[in-house]
């Protein structure tokens, strides 16, 4: 379990995170929501070990995150940040194979894993193409494939590993959004702990096992999507004029603009 | 597409290319030796004398220096995540040269030491200057955690200007003998290469080149960005310090022994990437081979053009590299805008 307890992060006098507590459990897709500047990406950086909180503590499998070595951490969790620019003309398979850096794999195994994972994200048969020649959405899925092989390379099991994603579908079309979210849901069911920042509250409600809503560095909601059915939480946090209605098939809460 | 025929076999192609150029360099000059005889090693005593005391050490020096300059260019480009990074353009070489100049002009005992000790001392001074400028560039070009091209090139201009005036000052205060030593050295010349110097240079550069090759996987991780490389298990801060040390040593040693030879570090890795792809596991060793070939070729050309005199090799590489840099800069601007 990735255990975040009372984490506070202060930068230049501003509380970017204020006593944030949450748990990312294996087998669950936890979705982080919140308006711009609420501290979502900052929280992701704390959970991945890139930023040290001023107070509070983060534990990964009962061991403080700061005590993990970089090499062990790289085998335990993979992190996808927003928009990655590559300065030189690497091919798609070269970019994806960077995710195998923490592992020692035979060439044939590596190629098989890379091509299978590219199929998973809908980018099969693009191995030889140049990364820079792809569209933003395609590049985003290539980077997703890279963090996935980082976890899949462990033949032992996918269980007890963590995936931390910062808006992995921001540049994708509808078909690809659905494909990626279904993939994340499936991975969670297979035992992965998924931490995913999203902007779309409707998709979050539809796919998330657990939603965490941030506002100005504080957790203002943490629970199942169903719990938002009877609450004004989304409307007040996002300060938007919305109509709340249940999903026609699943009954989960959905929100529409009031124009 | 990338996987054309020649992209599959980079090493044989580049090795044969280097061997041909090396043979050309050994046989051509004010006194030419038949290459058939060299290949069959049926040469007479005069030929052997010329080969062993003049041409062979010079060839080996060109190979070592060319490889080191090209590889340090490739390392800097990975470090700064920018294809325009080059030790010459960013002022690392000229920063190193100032410290060698200071050593020549202001150190009264240096002249009395044996040649190898002088060589090591000059290398140490150049290394110190190179580390200092690398650090300066990093501080000046960092902008919100990212290295911007604009800041990078501006830092280079500023450092080159500063070094230029410092060198000018040194020539002003030096006496006749020091002035001769200074100008002769600063021109960028492989002509003075002797076996002792080749040994010193090889003892420093060969381990560095091996280290760079072994780190090529980690260099690839840096291409993703520092944060992402850390997530993949690389201790980025430590790695950057090591890389800077390697670049500074490579540049320092080459500057100390051969003066300023520009643009090899810019041209060679770029050509390698165009021909064989951007994977550093290929780029590093191929840059070493192609850099060695290019500098050997440029040096031979510099010897042959105005027989019996010779041009400084730095002049030849700059003549090639200047237009290349302009083309690369324009291409870069067009791609980013």
Image: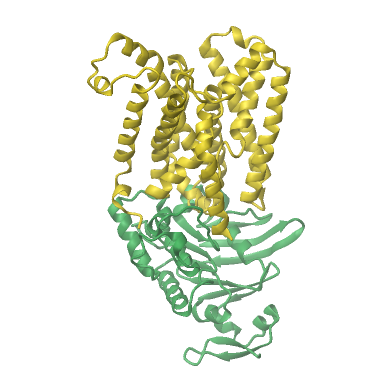
Chain colours: A green, B yellow
Q: Quadrant of residue A218?
A: bottom right
Q: Is residue B41 left or right of residue B259?
A: left
**Which sits in the foreground, B186 or B272?**
B186
- Judge whether B283 appears above or below A166 on screen: above
Please state the horizontal and vertical placement of residue B83, each as a whole percent of the image.
Answer: 52, 47
Q: Could you tell me if residue B286 is visible in this image?
A: yes
Taking the spot 36% from the left edge, 64% from the top edge, the residue there is A126
Q: Is residue A82 left or right of residue A258?
A: left
Up-down relation of residue A162 to residue B114 (above or below): below
B33 or B213, which is in the foreground?
B33
Question: Residue at image x 45%, y 63%?
Answer: A133
Task: Residue A59: give x, y in percent of width and height.
Answer: 56, 57
Asked whether residue B235 is in view, the answer is: no
Relative to A201, say whether B307 is above or below.
above
Where residue B82 sits in the image (x, y, percent)?
54, 48
Residue A244 location (% of width, % of height): 61, 89
Write the residue at 56% across / 86% down.
Answer: A253
Q: Residue furthest right?
A: A13
| Number of numbered callouts drawn | 0
Left or right: where A168 falls relative to B44: right
**Drawn side of residue A17 relative to residue A150, left or right:** right
Compare residues A187 and B144 and report the one nearer the observer.
Answer: B144
């Amino acid at each position: 379990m990735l255990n975040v307890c009372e984490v506070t992060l202060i930068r230049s006098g501003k509380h970017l995170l204020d006593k944030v507590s949450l748990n990312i459990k294996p087998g669950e897709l936890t979705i982080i929501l919140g308006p711009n500047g609420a501290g979502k990406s900052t929280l992701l950086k704390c959970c991945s070990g890139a930023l040290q909180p001023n107070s509070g503590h983060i534990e990964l499998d009962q061991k403080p995150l700061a005590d993990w070595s970089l090499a062990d951490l790289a085998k335990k969790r993979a992190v996808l940040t927003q928009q990655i620019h590559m300065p030189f003309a690497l091919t798609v398979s070269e970019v994806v194979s960077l995710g195998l850096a923490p592992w020692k794999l035979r060439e044939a195994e590596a190629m098989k894993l890379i091509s299978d994972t590219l199929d998973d994200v809908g980018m099969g048969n693009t191995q030889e193409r140049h990364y820079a020649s792809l569209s933003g959405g395609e590049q985003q899925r290539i980077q997703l494939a890279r963090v996935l092989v980082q976890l899949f390379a462990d033949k032992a099991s996918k269980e007890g590993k963590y995936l931390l994603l910062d808006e992995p579908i921001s540049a994708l079309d509808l078909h690809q959004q659905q494909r990626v979210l279904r993939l994340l849901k499936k991975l969670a069911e297979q035992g992965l702990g998924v931490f995913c920042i999203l902007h779309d509250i409707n998709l979050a409600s539809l796919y998330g096992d657990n939603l965490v809503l941030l506002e100005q560095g504080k957790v203002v909601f943490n629970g199942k999507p169903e719990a938002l059915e009877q609450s004004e939480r989304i409307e007040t946090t996002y300060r938007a004029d919305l109509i709340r209605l249940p999903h026609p098939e699943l009954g989960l809460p959905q929100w529409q603009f009031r124009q | 597409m990338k996987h054309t025929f020649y992209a599959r076999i980079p090493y044989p192609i580049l090795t044969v290319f280097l061997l041909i150029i090396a043979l050309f360099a050994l046989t051509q000059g004010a006194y030419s030796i038949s290459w058939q005889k060299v290949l069959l090693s049926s040469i007479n005593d005069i030929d052997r004398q010329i080969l062993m005391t003049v041409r062979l050490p010079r060839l080996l020096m060109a190979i070592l220096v060319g490889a080191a300059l090209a590889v340090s260019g490739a390392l800097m480009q990975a470090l700064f995540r920018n294809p325009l990074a080059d030790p010459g353009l960013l002022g690392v070489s000229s920063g190193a040269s100032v410290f060698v100049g200071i050593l020549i002009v202001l150190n009264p005992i240096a002249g009395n030491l044996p040649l190898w000790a002088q060589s090591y001392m000059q290398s140490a001074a150049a290394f110190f200057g190179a580390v200092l400028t690398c650090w300066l560039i990093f501080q000046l070009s960092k902008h919100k955690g990212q290295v911007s091209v604009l800041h990078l090139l501006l830092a280079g201009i500023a450092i080159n200007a500063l070094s230029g005036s410092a060198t000018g000052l040194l020539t002003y205060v030096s006496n006749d003998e020091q002035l001769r030593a200074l100008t002769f050295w600063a021109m960028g010349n492989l002509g003075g290469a002797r076996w002792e110097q080749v040994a010193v240079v090889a003892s420093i550069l060969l381990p560095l080149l091996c280290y760079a090759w072994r780190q090529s996987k980690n260099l690839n991780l840096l291409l993703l960005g520092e944060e992402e490389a850390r997530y993949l298990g690389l201790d980025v801060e430590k790695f950057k310090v090591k890389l800077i040390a390697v670049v500074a040593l490579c540049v320092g040693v080459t500057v100390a022994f051969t003066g300023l030879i520009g643009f090899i570090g810019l041209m060679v890795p770029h050509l390698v990437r165009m021909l064989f792809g951007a994977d550093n596991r290929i780029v590093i060793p191929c840059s070493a081979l192609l850099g060695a070939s290019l500098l050997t070729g440029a040096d031979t050309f510099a010897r042959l053009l105005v027989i019996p005199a010779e041009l400084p090799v730095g002049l030849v590489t700059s003549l090639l590299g200047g237009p290349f840099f302009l083309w690369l800069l324009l291409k870069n601007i067009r791609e980013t805008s």
